[in-house]
Image: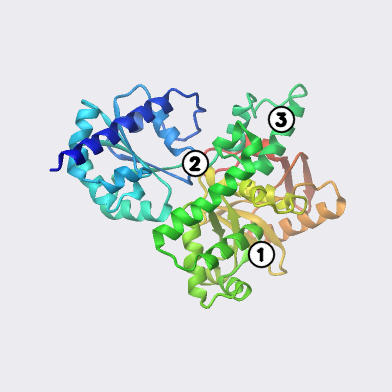
Amino acid sequence: MQPNKTYIMKATLINQRKERDELLARPYLWRHTKYNIDELLENHIIKLITGPRRAGKSTQALLMLKNRNFAYINFDDADLLNKWDEELVTRLLDEVYPNYDFLLLDEVQNLDEWDLWVTKLYRRGKNLVITGSNAKMLSSEMATVLTGRYIQIEMLPFSLEETFEWNHLNIKEINEGNRTNAIAVCDDYLHNGGFPETMESRGITRSYLSTLFDSIIFKDIVKRHKIRNTTDLNNLAMYLLSNFCNPLSANELSNELGFSSVNTVKKFMDYLHEPYLFYYLPRYNNKLKLMKKAPQKVYIVDNGFVSAKAFSLSENIGRLLENQVFVELLRRGYDTETTLFYYRSRNDKETDFVLRNGTHIECLIQACYDISNKKTEKREISALIECAEELKCKNLMIITNQEEKVIAKDSYMIRVVPVSRFFKNISSHNHLS
């Protein structure tokens, strides 16, 4: 073993320990989760925290382990990766963190064959907390080597409720005294999103998120998948961003953007989803084959990315609300594989969100920023009821910016709720009251 390699690796781990301690000393907002953290940590099952870059995964992991004896490795470190030697690192960890009880591996997907090393650590009895920014790679590789031995905790940017907390407001206690502030926070969140590092300095939001967007494209996708044609990938990403909340098919995209192959479009779309950047919502159909053929609606993980790329927000305000509702549904446990869809009726009328529990359709939701105009209200209600009749669902809701009432139409009672109340009343997992 080369002495200088040992020295360099130990110095790297010591520097990372200093970084860990400095991070632990900062004030943070504790993030909402359905899990009991003490129970999670007592169990030797691997705790896998996933989500987009800069959404707060590392912070949450640090908060989980605060006041506990834990070792820390950050794999967003070129020195560490260039000099990597797993046996050496395993040994040095005991020197830098004597008798540690937990091991936090941050952004572990950056390490080649990380899953094999994690498997060894797990078999040696290490209590592991892992963070990562690649949904497909982490879940598929963990499932392959550690089936049933890990639990996945998904961490997205701040919710509206967490943004209220950051601003020292309680979303459950909006009253005349704080209503003006609450409306301002809702409007700010709608436009600028919830990435934690933009909360304190909203003036940097656009430049910060523009840089982050580009970093995800080039660091998490181009570099990882060794993509040569970066222009096509970037053009697709920008087209999806400018058409968020719209239904698109791979064939349409291929024609519109001049791709040589529909399969390349599909592959690139998958790549854009892996780092939690874009999501694709299928159209509901009882026949799986037809569902797979229909165009999918495109959503972005955070509204701030739309503002950051300088599209005209006046024409996007309704779509910003719809995107916000979509991400909140993800945050609350719905997923685009089994429980969350959009629907288009036989007469081509659309409902934004179909929530399903097993085989049961539990709720239909429209997102409409402003329904004060009677024509707009009639259009939204007509579409909702037509879809409700076809799907045999009585639980109907329209999410607005501020309006609140109940509309009785035919045999239906439609709840119109402001976005703040919707986020307050929705429960933690797959149920709407």
Name the amino acid, label 2. Arg
Q: In the picture provided, is 191 more to the left or to the right than 33? A: right
Residue 57 x %, y %: 44, 38
**Would you name the residue on which mark 2 appears?**
54
Residue 199 x %, y %: 60, 33
Vertical arrangement, residue 284 with respect to residue 179, above or below: below
Q: Earlier in the sequence, mark 1 or mark 3?
A: 3
Residue at 73%, 24% (x, y): give it. 178
- Depth order, front residue of 324/258: 258
Query: Residue farthest to the bottom?
Result: 260
Here the colouring is rainbow
Residue at 69%, 40% (x, y): give it. 419
**Would you name the residue on which mark 1 appears?**
344
Label 1 CA crowd tier, 10 Å (few <14, some 14–19, many 20+): some
Name the amino acid, label 1. Arg
Mark yes or no: residue 135 visible.
Answer: yes
Residue at 57%, 64% (x, y): give it. 236
Query: For the residues marked 3 and 2, what is the alpha-carbon distance in whole angstroms?
Result: 25 Å
* Picture disc at residue 182: 3
Quarter holding residue 376: bottom right
* For discs 1 and 2, the disc positioned in front in the rendered view: 2
